[in-house]
Amino acid sequence: MRNHVFNGILSETLTLKNDVHEVTKLSSFEKALFEKIGLEDALASKMRLAVEEAVVNVMEYAYPIGEEGEIEVCMTADGECLTVVVTDAGTPFDPTLKEGVDISLSAEERQIGGLGIHLLRALMDDVHYEYLNGRNTLTLTKRLKD
């Protein structure tokens, strides 16, 4: 884990393996950072849910079965926004291109997939994807103040 504070901006980075057992490390990382910035419990819960959804999807789908890979999670708080950047070198995939799901349909009537990006869009103020230099980069932004 790397930690940087510059001009009141806190930035911490955690590198995980593409193994769902690593989610406990992510949870501890999030909890510690959210405590440092004094994030209220309700917002912290939403942030944890969104970040864990994004990271677990990368762990499960970015790399071919049996291939080891890394996922980097960088969280930056500047007092106004909390930005989470999730990067990996797995298969290129832009989740923002996924059409919205019709949540009015029952689980049996809906197509499989798409709820994760729906959740990210609902919980975050901005969700942005780029594929640069062989890396997927998913940026999640949440305003801390209205």
Image (cartoon, grey):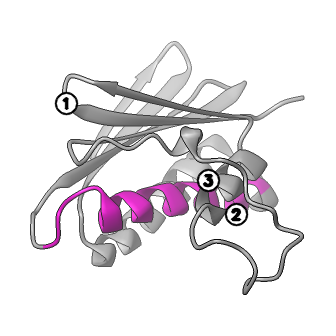
User: Would residue 51 be counted in the magenta stretch?
Assistant: yes
Which residue is label 1 attached to?
Answer: 134
The kind of residue tagged 1 is: Gly
First in sequence: mark 2 or mark 1?
A: 2
Q: Relative to 99, is 130 above or below? A: above
**Amino acid type assigned to the residue bearing label 2 in the image:** Ser
Q: Quadrant of the C terminus?
A: top right
First in sequence: mark 3 vs mark 2: 2
* Amino acid type of the residue that numbered disc 3 sits on in the rendered structure: Ile
Query: Where is residue 58 shown, x and y percent of the image?
Result: 36, 57
Please determine whether, in this image, residue 34 is positioned above or below residue 20.
Answer: above
- Helix, strand or loop at label 2? It is helix
Task: From the top left corner, tell me how far across and down residue 93 is, in percent.
Answer: 38, 44
Q: Main secondary structure of the magenta part?
A: helix
User: Tag on residue 45?
Assistant: 2
Instruction: Please report the bounds of the magenta region as a residue range.
Output: 43-65
Q: Residue at x 25, y 33 (%)?
A: 135
Q: Residues within 10 Å of mark 2 (few under 14, many from 20)?
A: some
Front residue (pair 19, 4) = 19
Q: Which residue is mark 3?
A: 117
